[in-house]
Each structure stands twice: as structure tokens, then as C-alpha cells.
């Protein structure tokens, strides 16, 4: 796998989405409970892979590690945790040309690295890039009181509030709406 230093938002998005597949966050249960679900998760992030039960177990372990980095108490702890993710399988850097003949600094992964270690490098680079460019304050818990999710905010303005905006944001809006309606009728 090739991981572009400059495109940290991709790895950060995979980190957020992976952490929030957990049964800690999902009331309906683990969103990557079997290899097929893991394959679908990867495909949604433009990673085409056949998966198996061994890889699934490693991905669940990675998910816990990534959550611990996002919940780190200090910036130094977060950096150490993200460095450890990168160190699982990173090689390089190397310089490669894209289809428009522009050169990019890339980290490669060890050829025999398991899927979860490749993902660890992608996520680690994403988290380190976010820390360096945007700061530790971009690692945040979901603002929904009903949600245990965490996320990385790589938006320009830095005002993202929810781990899954379409789910948690709506839930808060619905709750507020219901509260307003109740107030009207008491
Ligand atoms: Zn949430």
C-alpha cells in the first residue's frame, strides 16, 4: 500500500469511521462483525481486499488501538500512539509520479504486512498529519450525549461536532425538536 504524506485527511477519515464501527458506539452491534462486512467497509474507503477471520480479529485489535490514540490525555501520548501505528509496517519514504506526472512523497508498507498493519500505517499517517497541521484539539468526542463515538475533525473551519453527522446530528435535532414540542404543551 502507498500512503501519501500530504493527504492526511484520508487516513483520518478511515480512523474515524473504523473506530465508530465498534459495538461501544453502535447500539445495533459491531458494524464490521464478519469478514464480508470488513470487505464492504474497506471498499467504501477505496481499498479492495479479500478478507478472512484472522484479518478481522487484527482489525478489531487495531480499532481499539486507534480509539486509544483518539482518546489520549495529552498531545505527546497521541503522537506516540500514532507513531506506533506507523511503525507497524512503514517503509520508505519513496517518491512516485502520479498520472499527471506530479511527484509525491509516499510511505510504502512492508510487502508481507497483514491488512491491519497496512491500515495502521494509513491511519497513523492520517493522525500524525492532522496533529501536525491542525492540532490535538481536532481529536474529539461526539457532541451527542447519547453517543460514545470519537472523531478526527479535518474540516477547514474545525467545527465538526458529531462522529456520524447524519446519525448523531439528526438524533440531537430530533431530541431538541421533541423537547420544544413538549414545552409547548405543558
Ligand atoms: Zn456520535
Image: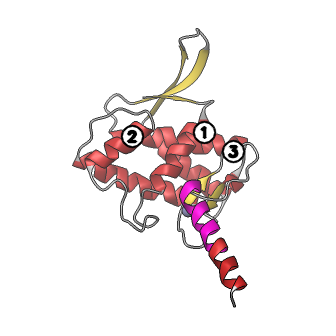
Color theme of the render: secondary structure
Read off the residue under disc 1: 9
Whole-percent x, y for residue 54 in the image = 24, 48
Q: Residue at x 31, y 32 (%)?
A: 112
Whole-percent x, y for residue 58 in the image = 33, 50
Q: Is residue 138 visible?
A: yes
Q: Residue at x 66, y 83 (%)?
A: 182
Give the quadrant of ligand 1: bottom right
Residue 110 among those drawn in magenta? no
Q: Residues within 10 Å of mark 2 (few under 14, many from 20)?
A: some
- Cβ at disc 3 under 8 Å from ligand 1: no
Relative vertical location of residue 88 with respect to residue 178 in this rendering, above or below: above
Separation of residues labelled 1 and 3 (CA atoms): 9 Å
Looking at this view, name the residue that lies furthest to the bottom: 186
Q: Is residue 47 rendered to the left or right of residue 82?
A: left
Separation of residues labelled 3 and 2 (CA atoms): 22 Å
Contact (CB < 8 A) between labels 3 and 2? no
Whole-percent x, y for residue 34 in the image = 27, 52
- Badge 2 or badge 1: first in the primary sequence: 1
Read off the residue under disc 3: 155
Q: Is residue 144 visible?
A: no
Q: Quadrant of the N terminus?
A: top left
Please state the extent of the stretch shown in magenta in the rendering. 165-176
Read off the residue under disc 2: 42
Amino acid at each position: 500500500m502507498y500512503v501519501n504524506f500530504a493527504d492526511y485527511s484520508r487516513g483520518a477519515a478511515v480512523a474515524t469511521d473504523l473506530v465508530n464501527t465498534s459495538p461501544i458506539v453502535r447500539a445495533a452491534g459491531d458494524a464490521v462483525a464478519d469478514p464480508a462486512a470488513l470487505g464492504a467497509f474497506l471498499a467504501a474507503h477505496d481499498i479492495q481486499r479479500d478478507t478472512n477471520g484472522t484479518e478481522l480479529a487484527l482489525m478489531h485489535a487495531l480499532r481499539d488501538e486507534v480509539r486509544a490514540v483518539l482518546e489520549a490525555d495529552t498531545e505527546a501520548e497521541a503522537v506516540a500512539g500514532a507513531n506506533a501505528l506507523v511503525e507497524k509496517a512503514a517503509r520508505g519514504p519513496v517518491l512516485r509520479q502520479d498520472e499527471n506526472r506530479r511527484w509525491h512523497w509516499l510511505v510504502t508498507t512492508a510487502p508481507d504486512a497483514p491488512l491491519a498493519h497496512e491500515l495502521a500505517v494509513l491511519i497513523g499517517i492520517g493522525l500524525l498529519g492532522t496533529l501536525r497541521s491542525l492540532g490535538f484539539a481536532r481529536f474529539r468526542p461526539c457532541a451527542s450525549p447519547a453517543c460514545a463515538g470519537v472523531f478526527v475533525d479535518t474540516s477547514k473551519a474545525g467545527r465538526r461536532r458529531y462522529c456520524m453527522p447524519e446519525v448523531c446530528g439528526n438524533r440531537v435535532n430530533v431530541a431538541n425538536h421533541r423537547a420544544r414540542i413538549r414545552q409547548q404543551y405543558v
